[in-house]
Image (cartoon, rainbow, N blue to C red):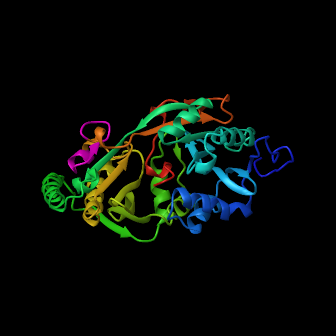
Amino acid sequence: MATSQTAVERSTADDGYTIRWFEPGDREGFMALHDRIWPGYSTAWFDWKFADNPYLTESPIVVAERDGEIVGARPNLAFQMRAGDTYHTAIQSCETMVHEDHRRQGLFSRMSERLFEGYADGPPTFTFNVPNPMTTAGLAKLGCDIAGEHTTHYRVQDPAVYAGVENRLLSTLSKRVARGYLDARSQRVERPPEVCVTRHTEIPARTLARLYRRRPPAEIHAYRDEQFFEYRFGNPQWEYTVYTARLGGDPVAGLVTGTQETESGTVTNVADVVPLVSDVERDRALPALLARVLADHEDSAVVAVRGDSIPRDLLADFGFHSDQRLPLRLLATPTTMIVSPIPPDGDWRIAGRDLRELDNWRPTFVEHNTA
């Protein structure tokens, strides 16, 4: 277990670096390093992501220390995953960081090796990551494998902001053109009048969990019970809103949005949809749900949807475009998923499904630690 510290685990290499598991007293040093690289995150964010995570008793973080200072960290977000009717603890690396004065010392590899060693006997059975290209290359050297690129669909509502254009006149004109195009497309979508949509500012975890249980997918995905919804949408870096749809008085579908202000504009993600699998009632309600979401977030520069749980033709009707196709292929950052069993020479199959096959996964934004 990662929580058992031994003299060997805390030994210091000849170059003065100690690679060890995170301890509660490291939070200040971790946040100081994090703020140096990614400023603007609070201790409440740290507590949500690592200390309050319900899926591991310890914070799954390996740190590099030198002369009493935290100079590197390999943190992870824990998930309970489901595949078929089986359940597995998994981890996803996030905010991997090394102080600029201590790079090119092999600290990323050493921290990763310690992570895999510490969890060789579980409880995490695999890791899945959506890292930047540099981290992807480092993980590949450790034996991880690329499963493929997740598809993200974007509704670009302010093209100039999305493309990074700062000219005010061009921005205004492009936004008006985009609004006219998107409104024309959306008005053609049928919205059954018997569908009643409710907006929730609090997370109705019980309702969302019940909707998930109606049609859970067979593919690998985050298990969505009440605990999951209460925890996952507690991220203080995002503002979450839930929309549920009723037919005949009963909830039949739900969408969760996450909105964040960025330097380039407001971004809204359709963070989740339940049920994840299509059925007649869910699909009848989705047009009304999406229409309400888009009406409430018309000032966002972009609205994004991850994966295929919402039908692609419905997204296209509302003006969403895939990042796998032109023109967004030239602008969007690919979301490459890299996976590995723990340890890396372990079994690559989970409930008979190969981790390396992207078709064996059913992702939304909730499986991405930054959303």
Decide whether residue 316 is among the magenta residues: yes
* Residue 136 in the figure: left or right of residue 333: right
- Quarter of the image holding residue 90? top right
Of all residues, the one furthest to the front in this rendering is: 101
| Residue 219 seen by the camera | no
Q: Say how many tags the image has.
A: 0
Q: Residue at x 24, y 54 (%)?
A: 165
Of all residues, the one furthest to the bottom in this rendering is: 201
* Residue 39 in the figure: left or right of residue 305: right
* Residue 268 in the figure: left or right of residue 356: left
Which image quarter is the C terminus in?
bottom left
From the viewer's side, name the closer residue of 321 and 81.
321
- Quarter of the image holding residue 51? bottom right
Percent across and percent down for residue 99 are: 60, 51
Percent across and percent down for residue 199 are: 35, 68
Percent across and percent down for residue 85 are: 58, 41
* Residue 110 in the figure: left or right of residue 335: right
Magenta segment boundaries in residue numbering: 314-327
From the viewer's side, name the closer residue of 306 and 206.
306
Q: Residue at x 35, y 49 (%)?
A: 305
From the viewer's side, name the closer residue of 103 and 223.
103
| Residue 169 seen by the camera | yes
Q: Residue at x 45, y 41 (%)?
A: 362
Percent across and percent down for residue 282 are: 34, 52
Decide whether residue 143 is among the magenta residues: no
